[in-house]
Amino acid sequence: MPLSSLDYLKEQLAELEEAGSAIHPKTLEGEQLPRARFDGRDVINLASNNYLGLAAHPRLKEAASKAAMEYGAGSGAVRTIAGTMTLHRELEKRFAAFKGAEDAIMFQSGFTANSGTVGAILTKEDVIVSDQLNHASIIDGARLSRAEIKVFQHKDVAAADQLLEETKRDGRRQLLITDGVFSMEGDIAPLPGLVEVAEKHGAIMMIDDAHASGVLGTNGRGTVDHFGVHGRVDVQVGTLSKAIGVLGGFIAGPSHLIEWLVNRGRPFLFSTSAPPGVTAACIAALDILEEEPERVERLWDRTRFFKEGLHSLGYDTGQSETPITPVIAGEDRKAQDLSRLLWEAGVFTPAIVYPTVAKGAARVRTIITSEHTEDDLSRALEAFRLAGRRLSLI
Ligand code: PMP
């Protein structure tokens, strides 16, 4: 066979396999439900971000198909040329109101909302002060902006304060940025403290509420609402792909920020806008969020039930305070074994290992949704009991 210039990737893949960190995604056969079929196996699904069970909700499916029939399958252009549809603007207005902001702008994903916004509002003269566990899309956006990046210890408000103090220069802009709910730990940012520190230094305050929209606050309005710091966070990021159940991201903030992103948010300018079906389904999701607050309450009820079950089995769930509940196993191999035993027992929870989490802190990550029944969760807990005993974790 002729030698290919990409052959080095084969060697690198072999190294990943050897280290046990190669990724082989399982395939979902059917809808994203609490009980679902992956790779031919029926399992209790503790792996999705479908917090409120909206991904396969009949009203969203109906809205998506109706919009596709009325407006077509695709938008046909980027937003700034011919791809801004009435549905996009309707969704943006709805999200602005939901978040209590002047305006909002939709991106193709939460990832591009973060990376496109951080990259657009700062320059290489500026500085970004960022929590150590912030999402990859914030890190990429920070790199794209070419601003200086300073990382503070996870949730350490005093360290953020000190970094803002040390990096202050005349004419230099400072951005303090945090996830609202951290995706691997399931803990909540100390937003009131961070807001205070940002105000003290005149820094821009930005929060990525990917895992908090639809989960925290009244009707799932997010971390700002949860802590009652309305009007004190300049930029709120949300995703439409998790609790909202569809696909996309948005930024909510003052109208001059939104107008700036229309002009300088590169994914907005250079990548085709969301299809009508996606956008209409997101609007239907917002309707449900506003009409059915009991969905969020049920999510928290189920979360408490499952967490208490894990604790009474003797498991360590780290600092988790939300439906994202890591079950700490320690070494990478232990987490992989735990995930495998659970899978064999009909429970799907992926292992999260180094470098996604620190060495020695490997885990399986469980995510509860409002649609899991107590019976689903009791069965999952029984599988955790048996697997944990076998691996001497409990
Ligand atoms: N921020 C955080 C904290 C996330 O966990 C994710 C998704 N993994 C994103 C942003 C990106 O969102 P999306 O999947 O909509 O691109």
Image: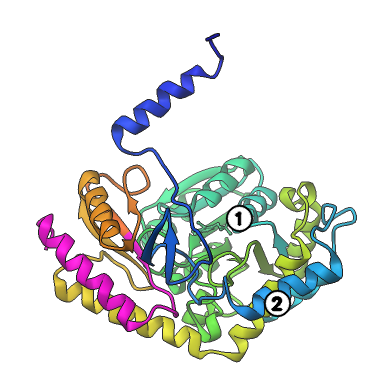
State which region is magenta. Answer: 365-394
Looking at the image, which residue is at 47% across and 19% down? 8
42 horizontally vs 52: left or right: left
Classify residue 205 by image quadrant: bottom right
The magenta stretch spans residue 378: yes
Looking at the image, which residue is at 79% across and 50% down? 269
Q: Earlier in the sequence, mark 1 or mark 2?
A: 2
Identify the image quadrant of the C terminus: bottom left
Q: Is residue 100 visible?
A: no
Q: Total number of numbered labels?
A: 2
User: Which numbered marker is on residue 327?
Assistant: none
Q: Is 295 located above or below residue 107 in the figure?
A: below
Mark 2, residue position: 62
The magenta stretch spans residue 42: no
Q: Mark 1 CB in 8 Å range of ligand 1?
A: yes
Looking at the image, which residue is at 74% across and 71% down? 65
Q: Identify the residue at the far front of this view.
A: 40
Residue 262: where, in percent of width, then height? Answer: 79, 57
User: Which numbered marker is on residue 114?
Assistant: 1
Residue 141: where, in percent of width, then height? Answer: 59, 47
Q: Is residue 259 visible?
A: yes
Using the numbered discs, state the Cα–Cα distance from disc 1 to disc 2 in whole angstroms: 30 Å
